[in-house]
Amino acid sequence: MGSNTISRALIASLVLAATVSLCIAVDVTYDRRGLVIDGKRRVLVSGSIHYPRSTPEMWPDLIQKSKEGGLDIIETYVFWDMHEPARGQYDFTGRKDLVKFLKLVGEAGLYVHLRIGPYVCAEWNYGGFPLWLHFIPGIQLRTDNEPYKAEMKRFVTKIVELMKQENLYASQGGPIILSQIENEYGNIDWEYGPKAKSYIEWAAELAISMNAEVPWVMCQQNNAPQSMINTCNGFYCDQFSPNSDQKPKFWTELWSGWFTSWGDPVPYRPAEDVAFAAARFYQLNGTLVNYYMYHGGTNFGRTSGGPFISTTYDYDAPIDEFGLLRQPKWGHLRDLHQAIKLCEDAMVEADGKTSSLGSNAEATIYKTESGKCAAFLANMDNQKDQTVYFNGNYYDLPAWSVSILPDCKNVVYNTAKINSVTATTKFATSGASFSGWSWFREPVGISSNSAFQLLGLVEQINTTSDKSDYLWYSLSTQINPSDPLLRDGSQILLHIDTLGHVFHAFVNGKRIGSGNSHINKASIEVPVTLEPGTNKIDLLSVTVGLKNYGAFFDLSGAGITGPVKLKGLSNGSTIDLSSEYWTYQIGLKGEESGLSTGSSPLWSSTPALPKYTPLTWYKATFSAPPGNSPVAMEFKGMQKGQAWINGQSIGRYWPASIVKADAKCSNCNYRGGYDQNKCLAGCGKSTQQYYHVPRSWLKPSGNVLVMMEEIGGNPTHVSLATREIGPICARVSETFPAPIASWNSNHLQSNASVPTLSLECPSPNQVISELQFASFGNPHGTCGSFTQGRCRSRRARRVVQKACVGKPRCSIEVSVTNLGDPCPNVTKSLAVQATCA
């Protein structure tokens, strides 16, 4: 057999061995240097994928891409609200099929970290708690409170017993090797007073009593009991130390990006900085890193929290919301993981010893008694590149980077030098058309027999139990013709004090305005015209996801709690309506009538399709776009509402939520400390333009779209799009290491003696069809905007053309021998852009 055949056979045998190993009971323990699996200490890479944020049909592909990206572990929360929507009534079907998801992970040869919580945060509605907890008499969540502890124990026991029944723990031959109790409690536990400590001790005892035979984690809990491994969450955790020298250094959440909120720019995090953060953690004796998120997914239905968290939960993760690889982030981190694995033998046997290499530069060496040696060289300066002297050699370190030397001599990887392909993505209009429009005008105000009347204004969440986003507040008030409000043509304002999140105001059946509040309490005033006699005031209060984080977040309210007043602007007269008898209706008539399923006698198609009318339900049919590309909905012409495809909720849409044009969006330099406000995009645009429609929810034809538009829009402008991969690019310098895949772990020798640029089409049935750009010298720009520099080789394009066109993948040595030397004594780069077909 040739060397390639031998390599493929070796890889296949290793994959088979890994898969088989997960069918055999293994012992999982830990010591101060790491997790110990069947007596072998490990350096591990993990990534978060939340099963309900994708579909079961997507799970195998997401898991496989995670494995190919170098992950050992898939980490997920367990979402209590989804599994127990009513007390004692459990649901583990569809996207909630936790057992199926975990079994797929195990079948792929990967491990699982199961974060039971049961509080999850996760930008998830109500932090993952079912709202019925709130109504248990005497309950106080997340503290030493007997009613809460009883419910928490019952649910944790339910999940652990389910895992045992399905043989999912490592001791049973399953994939679960770690579990978590509670979540980020240490950030806010001081606000709960002395009971916080006793609660944490109780939670630890509960976890251990489950006899799951795996280590338990408490993240962000510096005072975690000795039976728990306390871990770090954050953008950087290299300086973190566990609270005992007998515990390993674990990072449960390396934030690969950040979530998006309605009205705000879209955060992103450069691949170089994510790699730098992870490499620094491994450098300083860390042995487990988990990317949060590795695939973020979608907040389908009403699952997003916040409030005001968007429907997309893409998180700028290595695998994007639609399940496509985000390149170069995915590839650059894959290369990092391979480099870390080359260091594993030395790292698990020795402690890293760190020494200074000069200003903002340091080296860490892992050296064993048997002679194994691995080193990390770091330049923490956020501006200056440095040349450092280490172990008898000089090394060039770009600013804000880490170089990895698995033999303490050869650099196989640098976090600032991306050697993987870059793939651009775009949305392409599918051409699918919507037909057979019908509609239903939601009544303004009270329309249900279940409406009720109360004195004064009520808080929304306690009233609706979050069964709907919507709560009507309705009042009829008499205005005397002689009332000062109507004298002298005074402008009248309707003053509303609200706890949020959104409201729409109607007077005498006409919408007079809308408002929203991102803060706990806001006062909003809307001009109104009143008539002598009876005036009907209808206020529709709308939640946009319940709060999910912070001490006592469960007590945060919503709705129009008042005062509500009529104010004469010029004469100062006021009528306070707050203490009147208001009539309330939970939800909309269309919800009660099941319009979201598409089948109801309420639908009408005459006389003409209403446009730009508030509170209107729309229905149409369409055919699925051809092909296999991911599908998205673009709600052009609409403003705010909810949408369903074939009865499945794709979530809230809000195209009218526009990011301010003068927000701080700009090109982002990866060098220097990152936070969620550093790298922003989307200024002047809708916070979210495209909404994921899973392929598995679609039929070839006869699909039904239902929308409930709150403010008013033109549904005929709505369109479908497909998520497509555009040009692929790469840029490699003469100073780059040889490709990480070329290094032999046994003798640490590279099959390639020089840097190599590689391209690969994203789909297996594609070939590189066209070379759009190729330049060796000093090309400028980035993928999609490359331009020639003054220094460029005449030979380069011909060499790349011959090596790549007509092939699914290709590699080109980046050397003057191969590409020519257009400018001697100048460091040169090869930049290539191509298309696949």
Image: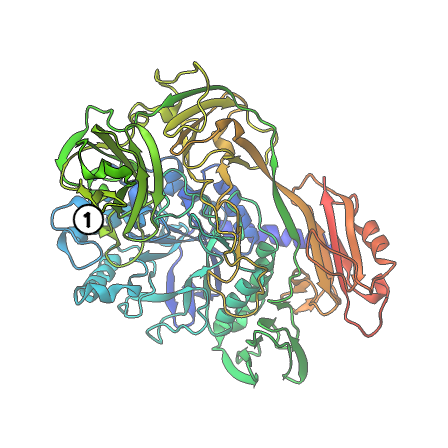
Q: Residue under circle 1?
A: 151
Residue 36 position, x and y percent, is 42, 65
482 on left or right of 427? left
Q: Which class describes the residues within 10 Å of circle 1: few (<14), some (14-19), or many (20+)? A: some
751 on left or right of 55? right
Q: Secondary structure at mark 1?
A: helix
Residue drawn at x 51%, y 71% as measured from the top left: 280
Q: Nearer the viewer, residue 437 or 639?
A: 639
Q: Is residue 132 visible?
A: no
Q: Nearer the viewer, residue 647 or 818?
A: 647
Query: Height in image: 313 above or below 736?
Result: above
Residue drawn at x 43%, y 14% as measured from the top left: 606
Residue drawn at x 45%, y 31% as measured from the top left: 713
Q: Amino acid at mark 1?
A: Glu
Residue drawn at x 43%, y 25% as measured from the top left: 618
Residue 424 position, x and y percent, is 64, 48
Q: Is residue 103 visible?
A: yes
Please, which colouring scheme is shown? rainbow
Q: Quadrant of residue 566?
A: top left
Residue positioned most to the front: 488
780 on left or right of 622? right
Residue 7 position, x and y percent, is 67, 55
23 on left or right of 244? right
Residue 463 position, x and y percent, is 20, 39
Q: Quadrant of residue 735?
A: bottom right
Q: Quadrant of the C terminus?
A: top right
